[in-house]
Amino acid sequence: MSALSDPQWVIQAQRISKQFGDFTAVNQIDLNVPKGHIYGFLGPNGCGKSTTIRMLTGLLTPTTGDINVLGLTIPKQAEALRQHIGYMTQKFSLYDDLTVKENLQFIARIYGMKRDLSRARIDQLQSTYKLSQYQHQLTATLSGGQRQRLALACACLNQPKLLFLDEPTSAVDPQNRRDFWEQLFDLSEQGTSILVSTHYMDEAERCHKIAIMEKGTIKADDTPKALMDNINAHVIEINASELRPLKQALITHAEVSSAAQLGHRLRVLIDKQIADPIAWVLQQCQQYQREINPQDIAIVSANLEDVFVSHTGKMSTPPATSKA
C-alpha cells in the first residue's frame, strides 16, 4: 500500500470492487482524487456511486482492491479517518426531534470536541449557513433547503480535510442548489477537498473533475471541459417541423447514438467516423422523403449530457441540464 500514499492525492483506489451475493455493485474501478479539488461522480441512481463512497469512508469493506484516503489504509484505519472527514448522506440523517442547535451539539459530542471549542464552532457554522435564526427550531419543521444547510454544517463541524457528499441536493429547489454549490466552492477555497455524487448535469459541470459511472464501472474520468472537447461524436441540431418521425428514422442507424428533442430542435449524436455529418443527415432525410433546408442543420458544441450519452448510450435520470 505504500504506492498509494502520494500526498498530492486525498483519495487513491486501485481495482476496487464490491459484491453483494451474485450482484456486483462496483466493478474493478480505479480512482485518484487530487488534493483541494471538487471531484464529482456523475451517474444515474443505482450505478454504484453511493457504494463507492461507503467503501472510501470505511463503512463498507471492498470485496477486492486497495484504498488509501488521506494517507490512511482503508478499511483498516477507518476509525482514524473519521476524525478527518465529513460525510453528508443521500438521505437526511439528523434527528427531527432535536433543534438545529441540539443536532450540532450532538455531533460535536460525537467528535469529542471540548465545550468552548464546540460552542464557538457551532456559532460560526450557524452564522455561515444562515441557521442562527432557526437554532431553537425543531429540525422536523425546517424546509428542504434549511435541512440541507444543517446537514452540511454538521458534516463540516470537525473542519474536515475531506468532505463526502452523496447526492446532497436531490431534495431542494434550483436556487438552494445554486447557493449550496457556492458554499462548496467557499470550502474548496479554504482547502477542503470534496467528493460529491450527483445525477444533475449542471452540478457535474461545476466540478474540477468528474467520473462518469454506469453499472458499477467508470466510463470516463477527466475535467468537464476535456470530456466535452474530446467527445467521440458529432453533435448536430436540426430545426424543423415534425421532428418525432425524423427522430424515429434517424435512431435506426448505427451511426446515431442518440437523438433527443429540445423544443423545435432535434439534437443528434453521430459517429465521429462520419466525415460530413450534415451531408449524411441530408442524405437520410432524402431517403425518408423529408425536405430539410441545409441552413436548418448545424454542428454545435457538446454539453455534458452529450458526453454522458456518448459513454453510456442512454439519458441520465433525471436529465437535469438547467443552469441552476
Image (tube, grey):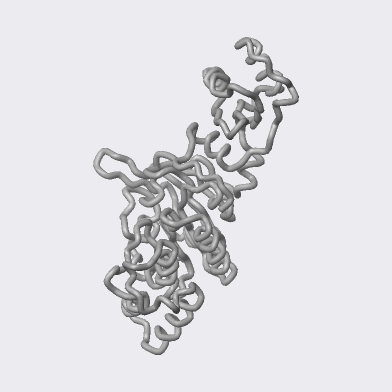
Please report the residue visible at 66 percent of the width from the left and 30 percent of the height from the top: 236
Please report the residue visible at 66 percent of the width from the left and 22 percent of the height from the top: 274
- Left or right: 61, with 315 as reference point: left
Evaluate whether residue 234 shows in this view: yes
Q: Quadrant of the N terminus?
A: bottom left
Task: Farthest residue to the bottom: give it.
Answer: 116
The x and y percentages for residue 48 are 39, 46
Evaluate whether residue 69 shows in this view: no
Please report the residue visible at 35 percent of the width from the left and 48 percent of the height from the top: 64
The x and y percentages for residue 264 are 61, 31
Where 278 falls versus 78 (above or below)? above
Task: Farthest residue to the left: give it.
Answer: 21
Please report the residue visible at 33 percent of the width from the left and 51 percent of the height from the top: 62
State the image quarter where residue 216 is shown. top left
The x and y percentages for residue 306 are 57, 37
- Left or right: 204, with 150 as reference point: right
Q: Nearer the viewer, residue 287 or 165?
A: 287
Where 279 falls versus 21 (above or below)? above
